[in-house]
Image: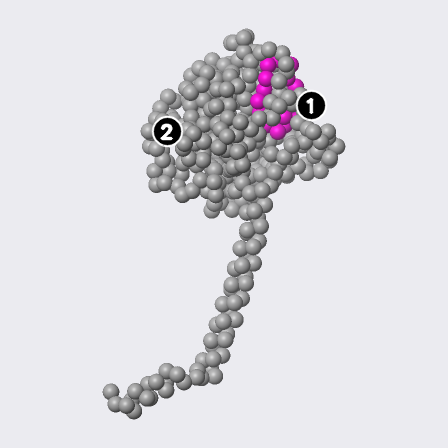
Amino acid sequence: MSEENTKTIIETETAAPSPKKKKRIESNWITKSICLIVALALAAVAGKSFYDQRHFKETVVSAPGLTEIKYLSDYVPALKGTYGDTPIFVYDSGVEGGSVLYCGGTHPYEPATSLSAYIMMENIEVTKGKVYIMPQANYSGTTLGIMGNAYPKDFDIETEWGKATYKIGDRTSNPLDQWPDNFTYIHYPSKQSQAYNDLRNLNRCFPGRLDGTFTERVAYAIMELIRNENIDMAIDSHEASIMYPVVGVYVAHNDAMDIAMMAAMDLTSTTFDMKIEQSPGSLKGFSHREWGDYSDTLAVLMETPEPFIDRIVGPMTRDLMLTGQDLFLSFAGKKGLTYVPYELETGWPMEVRVGRHLSSAERLIYYMNMFFPEKEVQATWPGYNELVEKGCGAFLHNPEEADPELVFKV
Ligand SMILES: [Zn+2]
């Protein structure tokens, strides 16, 4: 290459851009800056929403019979200060008898479960034995929604004194508390291979273990609660999509089958249709299986219909959560594809679902008392008919007017 040619190339490379090119570069910079600002603004809005969901606390006004508050960290101290710790409210009549544990929020995207626990707490009266109520069993799961599912983070219940707000969480523990997920999930201690996405599902992690994952530790703490407090009957409340066969049903451990069978027949003949299934021995990790196998408790799981989590519904709105009314689902209902009756006009409203749980728990205790008089528990709270007639709000108390010692943030 001649010296002249080299000079020409260097001059061309170092020459200033033409005015047209300069303008284009400037305009690119402006476009990129605007995109960055918009992205940051969207991230800030989304971030605030995630932060709020992670830190929002639900309010409950306990009935005066509250005698003690325990935490899962009392049984597994490693949970202290983590999102796995959650309160258990104890109502001890002082009269010797049996003990019952009622759990809500094992799957926090099934909020009629925790709401039924709160309504139980707000109105309970125990005259024999003890009742333990854990409104948010998987607290971590209440701190986010399902990733990829666009739905509201909460819903309101109208009351005479204003609105009470409750969260709609995830099915599983928050990845901020347990991550990364393995590609496989081997259940402990059965060694059964399960779906990998059930690694963070509390109701696949029982009986859990101390040195396991975050969710296994929470599961282990619940087992320890049941064992240490000699819980005679443990009730795990859930909600299910109505195109899934296990809905509107008790699933009972073999030891609790007689009780659940009687309760199901009683409810079906007097109040609402309730099915009964026996927990399959080979289905591992579930409360209805492992609670009964790894402790002396009588374990029963209950499912109410929750159209909100059906796959085929339209927009997942607060309204859908509260009414259960969805046009798409009604087409499935007409074709007989749902496992409980479904009409657009009636849907499955929150008060019906909460009322089902409250009466279903009450009937289980009633028949436990009949089969095992030595485990007798006498406790009252509002039932299905009252909930359907008056709505959920009628049974929630105004925290502003209540005794501050009975107002709790969960
Ligand atoms: Zn569930």
Amino acid type at circle 2 is: Tyr
Q: Position of residue 397 (x, y in %)?
A: 70, 30
> Is 132 above or below relative to 215?
above
Q: Is residue 206 left or right of residue 322?
A: left
Q: Which residue is mark 2?
A: 188
Q: Nearer the viewer, residue 150 or 7?
A: 7
Q: Residue at 51% x, 63% y: name it.
A: 36
Is 129 colored magenta in this rendering? yes
Residue at image location 51% in from the left, 23% down from the top: 225
Decide whether residue 326 is among the magenta residues. no
Residue at 55% x, 51% y: name it.
47
Question: Element at badge 2?
Answer: loop
Against 291, residue 186 (above or below) is below
Is residue 176 shown to the viewer in this render?
yes
Quarter holding the C terminus is top right
Q: Residue furthest top?
A: 373
Residue drawn at (41%, 29%), measured in percent from left and top?
Answer: 209
- The answer, for residue 246, to whether it is visible in the render is no
Q: Nearer the viewer, residue 135 or 276?
A: 135
Inter-mark Cα distance, 2 to 1: 40 Å
Residue named by callout 1: 64
SS class, disc 1 = loop
Looking at mark 2, is its residue's CB closer than 8 Å to ligand 1? no
Boundaries of the magenta span: 117-133
Name the image quarter holding the N terminus: bottom left
- In which quarter of the view is residue 404 placed? top right
